[in-house]
């Protein structure tokens, strides 16, 4: 009995510091964001005026906020699909096929993940430069361009951001899936091969189901992290321009805060928080399936 009490006290003492810090630095600020969304405060005065749900009513009439949410959702969906599709395919090829220099390709794919977003933004800004950027220079070798292509113009800025975000993320998840695929017994593939299953069939019928738990976990994490990464790339590459064409919700929130609309920016933060929470729940539910074991 005394032994169990001592163990309980030890567990409480171990968990208490982390719990206290989590409450102070996560729970309290989050609750404060919800509270501040119901008030309005000027840029140069600490006086707060209770406005209730007025900030939220104004929010859903704000066309630029709606546009920024649309851009954010578009980036999350497209970047997730492309990143996970290529990461799984590349991981499957490097794991199953005998390719010379596998470790070299693994390192090359992983390098972008260790680079700062600012560095990646600088690289792609140079690539997308209209006058003498790499893309326009290559296209100019094959065609006579009278006007340079504006890769960060209103029409192409979202696809340009998608390419940069995918390039940054794909290597990390490829390496993770390679580790999971390496644990799948080779005998399963040999048995499937004897039954006439080809490489593609084996990939979808054996590999994907057996690493599904890993895919599901990383998918939820990636979708939520993409909301933050989209903000970082937009801030570093376009600042939401041109004319708000690449603006995302988090960037718009910070622009409203910088304009002195603290309550309004906190209302945007609440919407983003609820959207992220709901999205996590939906993804977790949709991807739920009975795990397979080997």
Image (cartoon, rainbow, N blue to C red):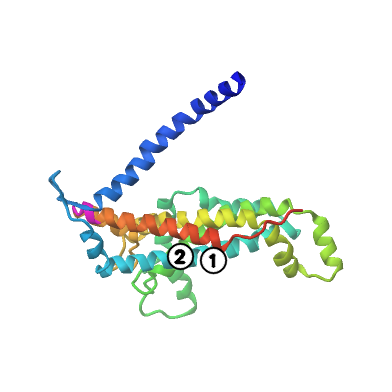
Residue 79, x across and y down, in percent: 49, 64
Question: Residue 133 is drawn in which quadrant?
Answer: bottom left
Q: Which mark is residue 196?
A: none
Residue in view at x 71 percent, y 60 percent: 207
- Secondary structure of the residue carrying tag 2 is helix
User: Front-most of 277 and 71?
Assistant: 277
Q: Quick one: which residue is furthest to the right in this view?
A: 194
Where disc 1 sits, the SS reads helix
Residue 160 position, x and y percent, is: 43, 67
- Give the crowd class for mark 1: few <14, some 14-19, many >=20 residues within 10 Å: some
Disc with the residue nearer the chain's start (1 vs 2): 1
Residue 33 versus residue 214: which sits nearer the camera? 33
Q: Image quadrant for the N terminus?
A: top right
Labelled pair 1, 2 in contact (Cβ < 8 Å): yes
Residue 27 position in % (x across, y down) = 37, 42
Disc 2 target residue = 162
The percent coordinates of residue 271 (x first, y second) are: 34, 58
Report the disc number at residue 82. Answer: 1
Give the residue displayed 24% in from the left and 69% down from the top: 61
Give me the residue at 76% from left, 58% from top.
98
In this picture, which residue range is highlighted in magenta? 260-264
């Amino acid at each position: 009995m005394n032994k169990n009490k001592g163990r309980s006290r030890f567990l409480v003492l171990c968990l208490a510091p982390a719990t206290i810090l989590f409450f102070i630095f996560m729970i309290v600020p989050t609750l404060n964001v919800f509270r501040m969304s119901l008030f309005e405060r000027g840029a140069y005065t600490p006086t707060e005026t209770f406005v209730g749900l007025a900030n939220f009513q104004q929010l859903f009439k704000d066309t630029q906020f709606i546009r920024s949410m649309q851009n954010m959702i578009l980036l999350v969906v497209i970047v997730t699909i492309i990143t996970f599709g290529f990461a799984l395919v590349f991981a499957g090829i490097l794991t199953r096929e005998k390719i010379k220099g596998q470790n070299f390709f693994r390192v090359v794919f992983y390098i972008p993940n260790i680079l700062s977003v600012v560095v990646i933004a600088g690289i792609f800004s140079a690539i997308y430069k209209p006058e003498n950027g790499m893309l326009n220079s290559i296209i100019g070798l094959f065609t006579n361009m009278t006007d340079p292509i504006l890769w960060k113009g209103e029409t192409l800025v979202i696809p340009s951001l998608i390419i940069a975000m995918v390039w940054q993320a794909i290597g990390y998840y490829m390496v993770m899936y390679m580790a999971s695929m390496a644990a799948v017994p080779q005998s399963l593939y040999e048995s499937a091969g004897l039954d006439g299953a080809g490489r593609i069939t084996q990939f979808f019928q054996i590999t994907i189901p057996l690493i599904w738990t890993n895919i599901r976990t990383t998918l939820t994490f990636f979708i939520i992290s993409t909301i933050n990464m989209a903000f970082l790339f937009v801030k570093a590459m376009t600042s939401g321009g041109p004319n708000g064409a690449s603006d995302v919700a988090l960037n718009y929130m910070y622009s409203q805060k910088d304009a002195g609309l603290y309550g309004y920016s906190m209302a945007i933060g609440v919407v983003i928080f609820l959207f992220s929470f709901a999205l996590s729940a939906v993804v977790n539910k949709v991807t739920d399936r009975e795990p397979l074991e080997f």
